[in-house]
């Protein structure tokens, strides 16, 4: 993942993992530190990694997989009305950032290798999806 102050500036790499999970996290108004802690536990132990026999039986905890955590308020974009998404369900940055920090801290306490981006910065996220697995995780 790279960050640049503006798109004309050369990108700086700020986070990288090997095999593991790219985690796009949306925070809403009623999320709490306990929500972030439950999410960390769920993500680190989610059995979506290949066990060598073609089955999703292993977790990042089992295979020492990394987690790339990226705050993504646009996950709460509501497009039910009109043609412009509404982001009123997304928590404001001053609420979301500490919760993302708490999530990352808890993942690290569990033993996870975690990389992150920079909050409130334009990020270029490059990922290679190894298999057709995308899941929505809610706690």
Image (cartoon, helix red, strand yellow):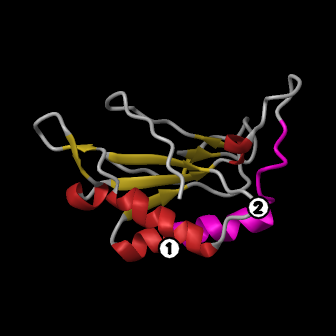
Which numbered disc covers residue 61? none
For residue 33, side relative to residue 93 (left or right): left
Looking at the picture, tell me which residue is in the foreground, 51 or 111: 51
Horizontal side of 90 relative to 27 (left or right) equals right
Mark 1, residue position: 105
| Residue 29, numbered label | 2
- In terms of depth relative to the viewer, which is nearer, 131 or 38? 38
Q: Main secondary structure of the magenta part?
A: helix
As drawn, the residue found furthest toward the left would be 53
> In the image, is residue 93 above or below residue 123?
below
Residue 10 on image: x %, y %: 63, 40
For image coordinates 30% across by 56% down, the residue present is: 60
Magenta-span inclusion, residue 92: yes
Furthest residue in direction bottom, as rendered: 109
Count of all numbered marks drawn on residues in the image: 2
State which region is magenta: 86-104
Residue positioned 89% across, 24% down in the render: 82
How far across and down, in percent of the image, does residue 110 sit?
Answer: 36, 73
Residue 46, percent across and down? 34, 54
Q: Residues within 10 Å of mark 2 (few under 14, many from 20)?
A: few
């Amino acid at each position: 993942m790279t960050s640049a102050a503006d798109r004309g500036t050369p990108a700086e790499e700020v986070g990288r993992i090997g095999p593991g999970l790219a985690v796009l996290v949306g925070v809403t108004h009623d999320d709490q530190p306990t929500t972030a802690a439950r999410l960390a536990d769920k993500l680190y132990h989610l059995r979506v990694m290949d066990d060598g026999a073609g089955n999703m039986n292993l977790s990042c905890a089992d295979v020492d997989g990394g987690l790339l955590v990226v705050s993504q308020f646009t996950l709460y974009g509501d497009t039910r009305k009109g043609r412009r998404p509404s982001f009123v369900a997304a928590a404001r940055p001053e609420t979301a950032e500490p919760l993302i920090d708490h999530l990352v801290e808890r993942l690290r306490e569990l033993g996870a290798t975690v990389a992150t981006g920079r909050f409130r910065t334009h990020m270029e996220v490059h990922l290679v999806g190894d298999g057709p697995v995308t899941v929505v995780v809610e706690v």
